Amino acid sequence: MLDKRKFYIDGKWISPSKPNDLEVINPSTEEAFATISLGSKEDTNSAVSAAKKALVNWSESSKEDRINLLEKLLDIYKKRYSEMTEAISMEMGAPMDWSNDAQTSSGQSHLEDFIVRLKEFKFDEQFSPESNNRICYEPIGVCGLITPWNWPINQIALKVVPAFATGCTMIHKPSEIAPMSAMLFAEMIDEAGFPAGVFNLVNGDGAGVGTDISTHPDIDLVSFTGSTRAGKLILKNGAETIKRVCLELGGKGGNIVFADSYPNAVRDGIRNVMSNSGQSCDAPTRMLVEKSIYERAVKEAAEEANLIKVDHASKKGDHIGPVVSRVQYDKIISLIQSGIDEGATLAAGGPELPNGMNKGYFIKPTIFTDVTNDMRVAKEEIFGPVLSIIPFETEEEAIKIVNETEYGLGNYLQTEDKEKAKRVSKKLKAGTIYVNGNGADPGTPFGGYKQSGNGREGGIWGLHEFLEVKTITYWPK
């Protein structure tokens, strides 16, 4: 059993102000493998005080100094890459190959990209050649960063690195369900030599440390990734002090498969949903299929789902692992049952454990057909390996169905008609539109419309999240 009870505050690993142990569960085995502490208001206050004190000097540090430290951090990350892979696999159930190739690699990719963006970024510039006004970008201050369990280091890097880059100081609360990757990253930050107090980590749950962060009068910005329900509470909490609140929340992505889509569009869509065991906020969990190819698509979808193996996260190979916790497992199984009860056709999978599994939070890749957009499986974010297939007849109908949701994080479309791809992309209401299986390039902005959040992470947009903008009306030339 790993003892990870300490917090990282003011450049030191310190014991919590009061005991409050929590076991971290391996979702493949349902067994505890580490013990952490849940922090108190006193721990949060200590971390915020350290960040506030460090802000005086760090906010005035040079861009070159910050680049040098981030490059050191990148070198350490590469050196300890395999440790990060193992931590993510154990804490949230990502199979080793997926943890290595997708999860851990995302942290390195964001580090590399933010270093490039920082080198290019101008923190002050003349408003125009004719003007003597100066535009200055300054760090917003002390930041509270709250990250999720489903893509742990991905979201940590998207928040911590731009906060470093812009001269902010911070307190980080990772998910208490999957805190090990965050604590490893804190070790890397310490090894890189960032000044004491610039980065602080306090473990805790949403009701405790999460609330303390979102209500704290000395925190200037809260950046949160997680559920829409929690995001609404954080937004309300932040209103009291008018702090900036940046939210990346839930999703219910629609994937429009037109009759003229490329040959493997349906099968690729299934693989996309099922990767990470369905635990991605921008997963295309509603597949809309043109009626002329609906029967073929349903057959292909069921075949592909049945080909996907489910196994322990510690194993290498092409398979999906468990979902992260008993709470998530019970929620997903309940929603699968609701699909059956509401009359959708179960084409693959179902609520039973996969063959050979008698322990662990494993769920079969599940496909529902004959789904209407008013069913729970079509409306609610399931966050598991579950896909609903909905038929449509016209382009306009498909767009309407996709947009009839409270979410707007990622939508998808498949067509070999270039003009149709452009036309439909412009009409879909989401922060990212994925066309014909193409992914977003490093440095592009990520975030949502509607109840999928506000603001954008990644690239230059990610830097701007942590900056205030100042106009100086007279700057002598």
Image: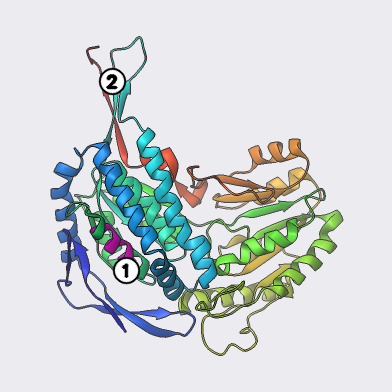
Q: Is residue 184 above or below residue 61?
A: below
Instruction: Tell whether 397 sits left or right of 25.
Output: right
Q: Residues under labels 2 and 1: Cα distance?
A: 43 Å
* Boundaries of the magenta span: 183-190
Q: Which residue is pictured at 15% across the width and 48% down the height?
A: 54
Give the amino acid at mark 1. Answer: Asp
The secondary element bearing badge 2 is classed as strand
The majority secondary structure of the magenta stretch comes to helix
- Residue 429 bears which disc, if any? none
Instruction: Tell whether 88 sits left or right of 213.
Output: right
Residue 312: image location, x then y, percent: 54, 80
> Hey, which residue is sitting farthest right in the picture?
292
Q: Which residue position holds label 1? A: 205
Residue 445: image location, x then y, percent: 48, 43
The secondary element bearing badge 1 is classed as loop
Mark yes or no: residue 339 visible.
Answer: yes
Q: Which residue is pictured at 33% across the width and 58% down the height?
A: 76
Q: Find residue 206 and report its image quarter.
A: bottom left
Residue 442: image location, x then y, percent: 50, 45
Q: Which of the two discs, 2 and 1, labels the residue nearer the N terminus?
A: 2
Give the amino acid at mark 2. Answer: Arg
Mark yes or no: residue 430 visible.
Answer: no
Q: Which residue is pictured at 58% across the width and 77% down the height?
A: 333
Which quarter of the image is occupied by the N terminus? bottom left
- Residue 134 bears which disc, if any? 2
